[in-house]
Amino acid sequence: MKTNVGTIDTVVRILIALIVIGLYFMNVVSGTLAIVLLVVAGVFFITGLVKFCPLYMMLGINSGKKKVSVK
């Protein structure tokens, strides 16, 4: 599996996930909104850890380092 999520993107994804989880446990969000946000936070956290995002792959996005070819 090729990585397509860069370092800054990884940090942002994990921070967003942790913030959403914190808001849930502090009872700031609840109900259906909380469930939706927790699912999104879970996806962000996992894609941040493995540095691969299937949506990025489908859209052709790569926020990681670009390989420089030497000719």
Image: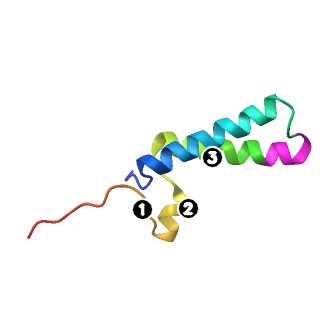
Based on the picture, tell me whether residue 31 belongs to the magenta stretch: yes
Q: Which residue is mark 1?
A: 62
Q: Which residue is mark 3?
A: 43
For residue 19, side relative to residue 54 (left or right): right
For residue 45, side relative to residue 27 (left or right): left
Label 3 secondary element: helix
* Residue at mark 3 to residue at mark 2: CA–CA distance: 11 Å
* Residue neighbourhood size for the residue with mark 2, other residues' Cα within 10 Å, grouped as few (<14), some (14–19), many (≥20): few
Mark closer to the chain start, 1 or 3? 3
Mark closer to the chain start, 3 or 2? 3
* Residue at mark 2 to residue at mark 1: CA–CA distance: 10 Å
Residue at horizontal 79 percent and vertical 48 percent from the top: 36
Label 2 secondary element: helix
Residue at horizontal 86 percent and vertical 37 percent from the top: 28
Res. 25 image quadrant: top right
Res. 66 image quadrant: bottom left
- For badge 1, the amino acid type reads Asn
Residue at horizontal 59 percent and vertical 40 percent from the top: 15
Q: Return the x and y of residue 39 as percentages of the image width and height.
A: 72, 45
- For badge 3, the amino acid type reads Val
Instruction: Relative to 53, say whether 11 is above or below.
Output: above
Q: Which residue is mark 2?
A: 55
Label 1 secondary element: loop
Q: Which residues are magenta?
A: 30-36
Q: Are marks 3 and 2 in contact (CB under 8 Å)?
A: no
Q: Nearer the viewer, residue 11 or 58?
A: 11
User: Which numbered marker is on residue 15?
Assistant: none
Q: Are marks 2 and 1 in contact (CB under 8 Å)?
A: no
Q: Mark 1 or mark 3, which is nearer to you?
A: 1
Q: Return the x and y of residue 23 as percentages of the image width and height.
A: 78, 36
Mark closer to the chain start, 2 or 1? 2
